[in-house]
Image (cartoon, grey):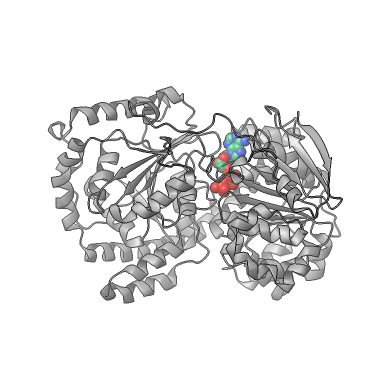
């Protein structure tokens, strides 16, 4: 059990502000108290179960049905505090289970005190930055409620809904609303949601992916909303750890008058907030004495930003040779499925899809241009294991940036496209891709946090995973930046991202002729046509999906997203790599990867619901194959960072 140490001191003391960053073995708990007192939690090896955290049997049974048996570190600390009614700011790495960390206690509170019959507005608002996240959180709450067999109503409000749809959704007086800040603001403005009723009813406000809420431009909406948040409302702020998180935390420290000077270094854009008059208003309204829960990587940005159960690799090659390398990785089965492949532009995603098709590899693309229904459906199909390779353009910004880089001739067309890109689209942040074993950076992300969030799509919760980044000479600069953020330096030989050990030069060269031949046939025109065709298909699908999902929300088989786009029939001989093209080393590596997959029960190519990826590290070739296996340079457990950490 946790030990509690109290150290009285003045809240205004700068040194003490630094003292407040207190790290326990697994989770830091920090309390900002107006009485000027710091509460320091020291966690022993905490193996408390969900019951021991105070969760009631119905919820524990529901979790068990979802094969969730033991809480993650952030859940262990957040759940009891939220049950006690505390305001909480939780920062933890991607995939650490933050959603359940707040959903479980919030639901339990609703089970215990069903919102008053006199309420005229929902009691719980969960605000997220994107529609995909909205859908994801909504599905999670709904499934928990169904499994617990309780009568609670949840609705999703989306900015694409008409005023009358919004009104209808709110008319049945839901208990929980999942939405974006902008949409709630719209409801308040058009009177669908009565401000007074909201003030009287609101008991819990959750800001999920909080840092992203600000970077998605919801700052004004959130500020406007604070006017309606009653003092007694419990506020929870969940965020992934990356540098940008600092922005949001500072925002709330500012709000709560709790300055932690350590954060100042991380947040240049904040001066404007410091002088904002609205901050004064917010100060009075949001977060009362919040507990700041932080996993240790926040104190030391280098440590454990990426979950330790994810092995990271890179392959250095020219931009042109990336096609050969990805073909080798997939076709020679050197990486484990499911695979999420990130690219920086929509055109590249279609080029890759067309290229894969010629080799008999089925894949689907996901990008901001597609209608929302289609995107959600693609995510669901991928999560259900209906196809193994998903090529994602990770956010609208990068797509637009990429569009800007395109040639003058294609620019006009690209502009047309970029106008249609959905500003609320977010593939990387927060989206829970199920059972992704490998993330491939076909294009390197443009920022280090972008890398962290892409890689965070694997190794979720207690699963294992791997990443392979294809790095061209032009991308070396960002690659070096990423490595230094992760903690690599020339002085010691610790490697966070190691050279990919399973692919020999011979194996690559043996595929060169075929790759170049196929690559030549995928012209710009072919890419453009297939992109347009896919969009047309998906718009049609989207309409069908809209109607269909109203009646059959669980039907996943109606429409296929991994269908062939190329007009040219794939040549039969390209489907398999003949024996004579394989070199001995790669063949051996491929065998080992297959054996490992079999050991993990990951043999079929599709529909592996419930695959857990729980296999021994020693059986994982990506972790054990190479004689020059990377030295991780990471500490065994989570790092303890106490007050004397700098000493
Ligand atoms: N205690 C647990 N045991 C096993 N799996 C869990 C547990 N808690 C959550 N999960 C699963 O882990 C996955 C990741 O959880 P979640 O999406 O909440 O992570 P997150 O911390 O919000 O990540 P991100 O910052 O990327 O949004 C989900 O599939 C979830 O069902």
Viewer-closest of 232 and 132: 232
| Picture quarter with ligand 1 | top right
Q: Residue at x 16, y 51 (%)?
A: 516
How many labels, in total? 0
Q: Quadrant of residue 235?
A: bottom right
Q: Position of residue 567 (x, y in %)?
A: 21, 58
| Residue 495 appears in the figure | yes
Q: Quadrant of the N terminus?
A: top right
Residue sitting nearer the eye, 597 or 374: 597
Vertical position of residue 414 compared to residue 310: above or below: below
Residue 424 x %, y %: 53, 64
Q: Quadrant of residue 166?
A: bottom right
Position of residue 502 measured from the top left corner of the image (x, y, whole percent)? 29, 33
Q: Does residue 560 show up? A: no
Give percent across and percent down for residue 490.
40, 41
Q: Hey, which residue is sitting farthest front in the picture?
A: 647
Q: Left or right: 535 with respect to 425?
A: left
Relative vertical location of residue 383 with respect to residue 567 in this rendering, above or below: above
Please name whichever residue, 61 or 134, is drawn nearer the observer in this view of the structure: 134
Left or right of 27 on screen, residue 576: left
For the C terminus, give its image quadrant.
top right
Q: Residue at x 53, y 56 (%)?
A: 132
The residue shown at (56%, 64%) is: 216
Asked whether, in this view, residue 301 is left or right of residue 124, the answer is left
């Amino acid at each position: 059990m946790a030990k509690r140490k109290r150290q009285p001191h003045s809240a205004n003391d700068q040194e003490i502000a630094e003292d407040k960053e207190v790290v326990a073995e697994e989770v830091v708990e920090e309390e900002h108290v107006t009485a000027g007192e710091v509460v320091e939690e020291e966690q022993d090896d905490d193996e408390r179960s969900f019951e021991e955290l105070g969760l009631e049997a119905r919820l524990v049974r529901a979790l068990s049905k979802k094969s969730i048996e033991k809480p993650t570190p952030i859940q262990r600390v957040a759940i009891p505090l939220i049950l006690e009614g505390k305001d909480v700011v939780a920062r933890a790495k991607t995939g650490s289970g933050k959603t359940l960390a707040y959903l479980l206690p919030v639901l339990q509170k609703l089970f215990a005190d069903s919102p008053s019959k006199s309420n005229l507005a929902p009691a719980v608002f969960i605000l997220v930055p994107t529609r995909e996240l909205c859908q994801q959180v909504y599905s999670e709450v709904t499934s928990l409620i169904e499994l617990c067999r309780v009568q609670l109503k949840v609705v999703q409000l989306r900015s694409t809904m008409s005023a009358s749809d919004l009104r209808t959704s709110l008319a049945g007086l839901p208990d929980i609303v999942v939405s974006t800040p902008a949409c709630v603001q719209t409801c308040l403005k058009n009177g669908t949601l009565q401000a007074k009723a909201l003030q009287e009813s609101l008991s819990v406000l959750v800001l999920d992916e909080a840092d992203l809420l600000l970077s998605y431009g919801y700052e004004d909406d959130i500020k406007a909303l604070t006017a309606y948040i009653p003092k007694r409302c419990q506020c929870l702020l969940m965020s992934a750890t990356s540098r940008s998180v600092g922005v949001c935390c500072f925002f709330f420290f500012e709000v709560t008058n709790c300055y932690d000077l350590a954060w100042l270094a991380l947040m240049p854009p904040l001066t404007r907030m410091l002088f904002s008059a609205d901050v004064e208003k917010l100060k009075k309204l949001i977060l009362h004495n919040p507990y700041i829960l932080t996993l240790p990587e926040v104190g030391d940005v280098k440590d454990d930003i990426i979950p330790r159960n994810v092995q990271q690799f890179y392959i250095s090659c020219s931009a042109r040779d990336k096609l050969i390398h990805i073909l080798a990785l997939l076709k020679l089965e050197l990486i484990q499925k499911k695979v999420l492949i990130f690219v920086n532009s929509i055109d590249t995603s279609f080029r890759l899809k067309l290229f894969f098709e010629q080799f008999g590899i089925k894949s689907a693309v996901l990008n901001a241009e597609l209608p929302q229904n289609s995107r959600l459906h693609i995510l669901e199909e991928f999560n259900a294991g209906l196809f193994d390779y998903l090529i994602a353009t990770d956010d609208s910004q990068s797509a637009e940036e990429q569009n800007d880089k395109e040639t003058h001739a294609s620019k006009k067309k690209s502009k047309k496209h970029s106008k249609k890109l959905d500003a609320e689209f977010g593939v990387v942040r927060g989206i829970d891709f199920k059972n992704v074993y490998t993330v491939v950076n076909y294009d390197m992300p443009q920022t280090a946090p972008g890398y962290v969030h892409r890689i965070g799509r694997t190794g979720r919760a207690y699963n294992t995973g791997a990443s392979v980044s294809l790095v061209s000479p032009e991308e070396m600069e960002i690659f070096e930046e990423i490595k230094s953020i992760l903690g690599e330096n020339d002085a010691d030989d610790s490697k966070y991202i190691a050279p990919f050990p399973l692919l020999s030069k011979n194996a690559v060269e043996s595929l060169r002729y075929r790759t170049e031949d196929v690559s030549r046939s995928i012209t710009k025109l072919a890419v453009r046509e297939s992109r347009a065709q896919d969009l047309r298909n998906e718009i049609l699908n989207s309409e069908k999906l809209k109607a269909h999902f109203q009646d059959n929300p669980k039907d996943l088989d109606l429409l296929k997203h991994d269908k062939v786009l190329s007009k040219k029939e794939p040549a039969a001989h390209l489907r398999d790599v003949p024996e004579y093209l394989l070199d001995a080393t790669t063949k051996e590596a491929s065998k080992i990867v297959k054996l490992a997959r079999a050991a993990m029960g990951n043999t079929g190519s599709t529909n592996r619901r419930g695959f857990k990826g729980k296999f021994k590290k020693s059986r994982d070739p990506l972790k054990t194959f190479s004689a020059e296996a990377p030295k991780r340079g990471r500490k065994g457990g989570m790092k303890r960072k106490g007050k004397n950490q700098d000493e």
